[in-house]
Image (cartoon, rainbow, N blue to C red):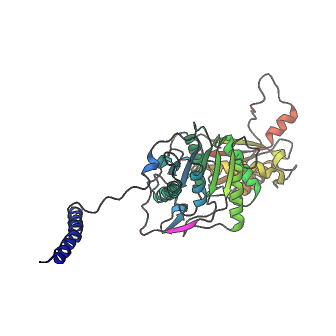
Amino acid sequence: MNTADIAATRAVRRRAVPTIAGALGAALMAGLLGACGEAPRLDACAWMKDPVDTAGRTVVLVDGSTSVSGSAGARDYAHSIGALLTSAVERKDTVSVGSFSGDSAQITWIAKDRSADWVKDNHNEINQKERKQQAVSCLTDLVDKAGRAVPRSGGSNVLAALTAGASSLEGAAGRRSLVVLTDGLSTTGCADLRAAAFRDKSEIKAITRVCAARDETPSLTGVHLTLAGLGQPATGQPAPTAAQRTWLSNLWRALCGAGKKAAPGTSCTLAPTAIGTAERSKPRKKPPQDPAVRYAQDRPETYELPGAALFDTNSSTVRPQALPLLNDVAVSARTTPGSRVVVSGYVDPRGRPDNNHRLSQARADAVKDVLTGLGVQRVTAHGRGLPTGCAKPDHTAGSRMTAEDKLQCDRRVDIEITRK
């Protein structure tokens, strides 16, 4: 072999060495993968689980009720609220995501205290941009998971969810943000809308008064609340008209205090977000039934309404000025589970005896008609004629009733709301 042949042979051997090594390496890796299965995927969201002492906190709660989740097509909150999630990430908030159903204790947390701080221990601008995108994607997945969670009980109490969400934000040093994704159709609590008329402002005022009287209005001082999806139920669920959706928005503005002068660091925003639909591949499991509460079921709630406020003299036509008062009673009756309502009409002794029963019955029937028109069911009306007694709490033994006081108390209508 001459010198040129020897040089060529050595060159071929040098090229063959790395090629053979690469082939051996590939074969070895293939063998390992074949023996152990596919290589584990990296969790792109793992860095968000590391605790970070950030000042700002955001809580996202998803309504799990049937009107939102449906059985075939649920509301796709996750991919419809990108701007809200991006804002939380921009602020580098610590974020928690959960779903709610039933009463205030029915919060199912999907994830707690996920850090969206895409800057911490990450000083490369390209990596920061990637982390920021990862955070939005990871939060979107968590909201999607919350929307698909099976509720722990039927129905929803949106006001109670606001209270629970605000409570979970206590202790945050910086901005406290609460995002509640719901159609706004509460079916329990003081804002139970199953029998609502969805018509005018007087009913909204009545609901807010009843909720305040029952101490069910949430304390949102220092919380930036955003409600998204109001009036947008799931596919196949009853859908409101444009006017009814406006009424629903006005109701929640009133309940969250949007019309009042808010304390510093407090706000209530109704996001004008169009929520898309997520089709389900299989029907959703039915939630468990709510347990029945039996205590205090026979204790009536009685409203003594003066006749002068309801009727003109010798008239059984309800005065327009009395409608807000009766609206309060109607809301209270509608939101008392399993209630039955008894209306009792009374007159004072100045009328003719033969007319006393007829007038008292006519007035009781008139009040019953108003309550029924406001969505109250199971109402009975009785004309009692002259009352057998008139004990008012503001007239004690040391303060005698005048003759006019006695007449005012006699000509009245009593409305009794009893659980059953």
Count of numbered labels shown in the rendering: 0
What residue span does the magenta drawing correspond to?
A: 272-291
Q: Nearer the viewer, residue 360 or 62?
A: 62
Asked if residue 382 lies in the magenta stretch, the reply is no
Q: Nearer the viewer, residue 376 or 177?
A: 177
Q: Is residue 90 left or right of residue 360?
A: left
- Secondary structure mainly formed by the magenta segment: loop
> Does residue 280 sit above or below 416 in this rendering?
below
Position in image of residue 245 (x %, y %): 68, 63
Residue 182 figure quarter: bottom right
Position in image of residue 17 (x %, y %): 20, 67
Asked if residue 278 lies in the magenta stretch, the reply is yes
**Is residue 329 in view from this perspective?**
no
Q: Nearer the viewer, residue 398 or 256?
A: 256
Residue 402 figure quarter: top right
Q: Is residue 169 left or right of residue 46?
A: right
Residue at image coords 57%, 41% = 169
Q: Is residue 112 left or right of residue 311?
A: left
> Does residue 183 sit above or below 389 in this rendering?
below
Residue at image coords 60%, 56% = 84
Position in image of residue 320 (x %, y %): 83, 54
Position in image of residue 73 (x %, y %): 50, 68
Q: In the displayed orientation, state which residue is furthest to the top.
A: 398
Residue at image coords 23%, 71% = 15
Q: Is residue 193 left or right of residue 96?
A: right
